[in-house]
Image (cartoon, grey):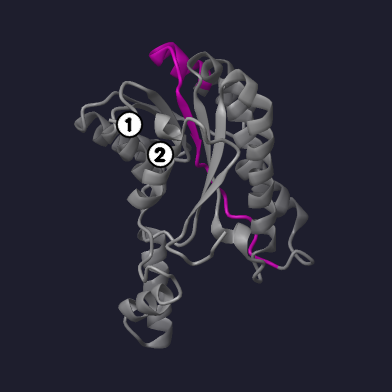
Amino acid sequence: MLLADKVVMVSGVGPGLGRALALRCAGQGADVVLAARTESRLVEVAGEVRAAGRRAMAVPTDITDDAAATRLADTALEEFGRLDTLINNAFAIPPLAEVTDADLDAIRAGFDTNVIAALRLTRLFTPALAATRGSVVMINSAVLRHSRRPYGPYKMAKSALLALAQSLSTELGPRGIRVNSVAPGYIWADVLKWYFDYLGKQRGVPAEQIYDETAATLDLRKLPEPDEIADAVVFLASDLARAITGQCLDVNGGEFHH
């Protein structure tokens, strides 16, 4: 039980990676605070955490709003009295467009959710994390490793998130707080399954063929699943990684080497 009796907060809880993060942490003994805009998803995942024998608190939150984020921190700490790991998983897709053409307001909005909100939550929970000598894990992306069109605004936001994690590692390390990142590539979950089905219909081939063609570009010849990404996060949150901070762990099946 790598996270026995610890308290973990996960932002951006949805049906894919967010759910997997919550359940894998609970499976390793943690109680979980769940935050996202959509209350129905939070309630569902909280029920699954409780069914696994751990406590769960669902707090509907817009983490881009100062007051809402402050209420989240106050509510979580009032209920559990501590925080051991903050997982910044909330994500908004920046515009998929050339950086020379992308709408600047849309780029700003992407930064607000992907970067500023992560900083906001980390600041709010810093005193609690210092008290437990805890950790922060930022969910980043394999977009860090390429500059393909039209992912420029996406790479800008995620590169800023990586820089934030590294700077926080330096600033918070003396207080005993570790800050790391996990960069997934493809994640074989509902959104990607839908997309592969769509591509298959466009080309008149089975979705399985799209999967096989994509997997052939990865060393392991299979696309990572949410639980596999979450397991890497659990490792970084655990005492097994007690001497690791300021690092970015790529979990991409060998699509990119870094």
Q: Is residue 84 magenta?
A: yes
Tell me which corner region of the image, top left, top right, bottom left or bottom right, holds residue 84. Answer: top left
Q: In this view of the protein, can residue 54 be seen by the observer?
A: yes
Classify 234 as above or below 215: above
Q: Secondary structure at mark 1?
A: loop
Q: Residue furthest bottom?
A: 204
Query: Range of the magenta residues?
Result: 73-97
Q: Could you tell me the amino acid type at mark 2?
A: Phe
Q: For marks 2 and 1, give the CA distance.
A: 8 Å
Q: Which mark is residue 235?
A: 2
Q: Which x, y percent locates residue 107?
A: 71, 53
Tell me which corner region of the image, top left, top right, bottom left or bottom right, holds residue 52. Answer: top left
152 left or right of 207 in image: right
Classify 48 as above or below 5: below
Q: Are marks 2 and 1 in contact (CB under 8 Å)?
A: yes
Q: Secondary structure at mark 2?
A: helix
- Count of numbered circles in the view: 2
Q: In this view of the protein, can residue 64 be seen by the observer?
A: no
Please report the residue visible at 40 percent of the width from the left and 35 percent of the height from the top. Answer: 39
Sequence-wise, which precedes: disc 2 or disc 1?
A: 1
Q: Which x, y percent locates residue 148?
A: 64, 70
Q: Is residue 27 magenta?
A: no
Q: Which mark is residue 2?
A: 1
In the picture, which quadrant includes the C terminus? bottom right
